[in-house]
Amino acid sequence: MGILMPKKIKHRKWFKGVSKGVENRATELNFGSFGLKSLSTKWVSSRQLESARRVIIRYLKKGGKLWLRVFPDKPVTSKGHEVPLGGGKGAVDHYVFAVRPGRMIFELDGVKEETAREAFKMAAIKLPIKTKFIKSNEG
């Protein structure tokens, strides 16, 4: 699958922006029985998400279905090292998703609770945010 990045974006470079409060979208389980929910605010890069996704997939071997509920579409720019001031904004370096508290990051189905818990525990290590294991109330 490779590194997550948008095929096409409206504006090549964005402002940094400010994270405002808690998440109001994608806060509940919609696809799977288990989820990994964010408890803090941070920019999560496409590399971190991909690394966490690969850890989960590897741990599950062939079983279960995984959903990624975030997509890194915010471009982050950087100028080269030892580049003097001026000369405008740097080139797009990588893409991030601005995670806010309450956002569901991953969802998982088709596995036992202990397996899902362990997979998400390993994935949480790869992410720069505090997370919480969520399970659905059905059944």
Image (cartoon, rainbow, N blue to C red):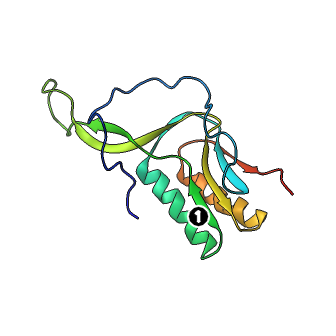
Q: In which quarter of the view is residue 101 placed?
A: top right
Q: Position of residue 114 (x, y in %)?
A: 77, 64
Is 132 or 104 nearer to us in this picture?
104
Q: Is residue 17 left or right of residue 121?
A: left
31 left or right of 53 in image: right
Q: Quadrant of residue 24?
A: top right
The residue positioned 65% from the left and 50% from the top of the image is 36
Callout 1 crowding tier (Cα within 10 Å): few <14, some 14–19, many ≥20 = many
Callout 1: helix, strand or loop? helix
Q: Identify whether 132 is placed above or below 19.
A: below
Quarter of the C terminus within the rendering:
bottom right
| Residue type for callout 1 | Ile
The image shows residue 17 at horizontal and vertical percentages of 41, 24
Front-most of 22 and 77?
Answer: 22
95 up-or-down from 117: above or below? above
Q: According to the image, label 1 marks what residue?
A: 56
